[in-house]
Amino acid sequence: MRKIDLNNFQVATSETVRDINSRIMLNLVRKHQPVSRADLTRYSGLQRSTVSAIAARLIAERWLKEGAVGNLPRGRKPTFLHLNTERCGVVGVDIQPATTTLAVSSMDSQFLAQESMSTEKDPVEFIARLSRRIKDLMRAHPRNSYEGIGISLPGRMDSSSQQLIFAPTLGWSDLDLKTRLEHAIGLPVELENAANACALAELWSGRYMDGVRNLVAVTVSDDIGVGMIMNGQLVRGSTGVAGEFGHVSQMSDGPKCRCGNSGCWEVLASNVAAVRYYAESASVRKGEVGSKSDMAKLPFGDILRLVERGDARACKALNQMAHHLGAGIAMLVTGLAPDVLVVVGEVTRAWDKVGPIVTEAVKRRSFTHAATRILPTDPEAQPRLRGTIALVLQNHFGAPLTA
Ligand SMILES: [Zn+2]
């Protein structure tokens, strides 16, 4: 049960009841479509007349559409309802340190188009170029309307000021990306940390998530991010920066981290860590081509390719990374006991090797018997980008704020 927040509440009106029932209906259609009014009556427990009235309103507002006519052995044939995917489009932007991916999606989270651009070091120039690209993309894919822009990025925003306050991999700080983009494009912008966006993507369109209320997403790339959904809600913490487990030091005399700390989980278990382990294990003989500093610039994908070919040093480097990844995940499983923990990132391509080491580390270090399922996500499913669409759609499909 949630305590009523006397600083942020909304008293219930007849409009509140209508809004809640409409959203329940919208979600039932989303889950069961195509679906008849009779089935919606059964699923919701509402009166048939109430279901018909809500359906009529959602059709008038163009959220729902009537589709095929069902076939029953006798009686009136039902008309099935489904979401009106034409109603609006959503723009999604996934900002990563080197590359930014843009996409337009329909209301059912299907991508209609996507493209990428380089991420500039200067945020002001980047915003100007991104705005132009978004406008061009919307022009090339005209919809009845665009509902908003969802953005995921490797950083944390202050929840009250919306200022970007912590983004070490991008090198941007004290920047109000949201307001600048809203002014440039004229659409509402929802900005979210990449790990939070991945957690939302799983919650809204994950494959295993029916009935899951406690979920943790761990994004592993050049950094490590953690997004937490507890009791069905994103955990933001004080000023919106909760989840920075990547910058909790695991080894006080470990390598220096970008955040200024030493031995952070991120410097031990991210992609960059695996590349460093690989370079450190090199024994370059006199006259041999290639040096440790060259190897430290290898893309993580190359390490994975070497692992596939059975390269012993690359396998060892990946094992070291997996061991540290498992140690941190054990901390999350023990401390938060989520129903599901999803791992996002290129490392999932080698999950047949990494997964057992992580599972073993969790088994060895966690004594709580938390029944957490640890699942890799498919990189092809683009969880970061899917999360940006969920950011915008949850405004319509999520539970409204009440008491
Ligand atoms: Zn750090």
Image: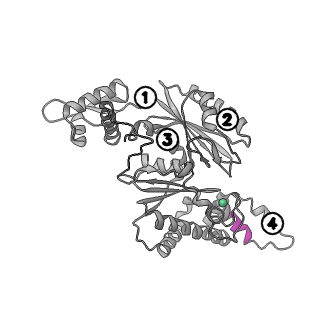
- Which residue appears farthest toward the left when viewing the image? 74
Mark 4 is on which residue type? Ser
The percent position of residue 149, horizontal first and vertical second, equals 54, 35
Q: Which residue is mark 1?
A: 86
Q: Residue at x 69, y 69 (%)?
A: 254
Q: Nearer the viewer, mark 2 or mark 1?
A: 2
The percent position of residue 93, horizontal first and vertical second, equals 58, 39
Q: Which residue is mark 2?
A: 127
Q: Earlier in the sequence, mark 3 or mark 2?
A: 2
Taking the image as shown, residue 357 lies to the left or right of residue 214, namely right
Neighbor class of circle 4 (other Cα within 10 Å; few <14, some 14-19, many 20+) is few
Q: CA distance from mark 3 to mark 1?
A: 19 Å
Mark 1 element type: loop
Mark 1 is on which residue type? Glu
- Which residue appears farthest toward the bottom when viewing the image? 364
Q: Quadrant of the C terminus?
A: top left
Q: Residue at x 64, y 31 (%)?
A: 131
In which quadrant of the rendered view does residue 314 lie? bottom right
Residue segment shown in magenta:
275-280
Q: CA distance from mark 3 to mark 2?
A: 20 Å
Above or below residue 186? Residue 303 is: below
Query: Can I make out residue 109 in this image?
Result: yes
Neighbor class of circle 2 (other Cα within 10 Å; few <14, some 14-19, many 20+) is some
Mark 3 is on which residue type? Leu
What label sits on residue 391 in the rendered view?
A: 3
Q: Earlier in the sequence, mark 4 or mark 3?
A: 4
Magenta segment: does it hold 277?
yes
The percent position of residue 79, horizontal first and vertical second, equals 25, 30
Q: Quadrant of ligand 1?
A: bottom right
